[in-house]
Image (cartoon, rainbow, N blue to C red):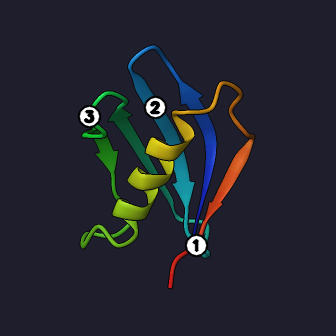
């Protein structure tokens, strides 16, 4: 599970800080048109959870009003 905070949408980019359950911080910025990662500060060297964060940002890009935070869960 990851928690996205500081979610920001610009004309062609989406970005957010994300946190794991131990409150370790990561950051991701994606391109809205193609969903490609532009910038990424990983929490884990393996990139654990990164694809879920990217997918959540792609889905959030369709919204006009960004939430304060978004919880991303998977199993």
Q: Which residue is mark 2?
A: 14
State the SS at label 1: loop
Mark 1 / mark 2, whichever is N-terminal: 2
Q: Which residue is mark 3?
A: 34
Position of residue 42 measured from the top left corner of the image (x, y, whole percent): 34, 58
State the SS at label 3: loop
Between 47 and 54, which is closer to the camera in this rendering?
54
Q: Which residue is mark 1?
A: 73
Q: Is residue 32 left or right of residue 68?
A: left
Quick check: 74 above or below 2? below
Position of residue 13 measured from the top left corner of the image (x, y, whole percent): 40, 25
Instruction: Say which residue appears at 42% left-offset and 54% top-offset.
Output: 55
- Crowding near the residue tagged with mark 3, few <14, some 14–19, many ≥20 C-alpha atoms within 10 Å: few
Alpha carbon distance from label 1 to label 2 = 19 Å
Between 61 and 17, which is closer to the camera in this rendering?
61
Q: Is residue 25 left or right of residue 47?
A: right
């Amino acid at each position: 599970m990851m928690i996205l905070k500081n979610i920001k949408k610009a004309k062609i980019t989406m970005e957010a800080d994300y946190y794991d359950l131990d409150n370790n911080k990561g950051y991701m910025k994606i391109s809205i048109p193609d969903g490609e990662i532009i910038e990424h500060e990983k929490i884990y060297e393996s990139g654990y959870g990164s694809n879920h964060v990217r997918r959540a940002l792609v889905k959030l890009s369709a919204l006009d009003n960004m939430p304060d935070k978004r919880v991303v869960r998977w199993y």
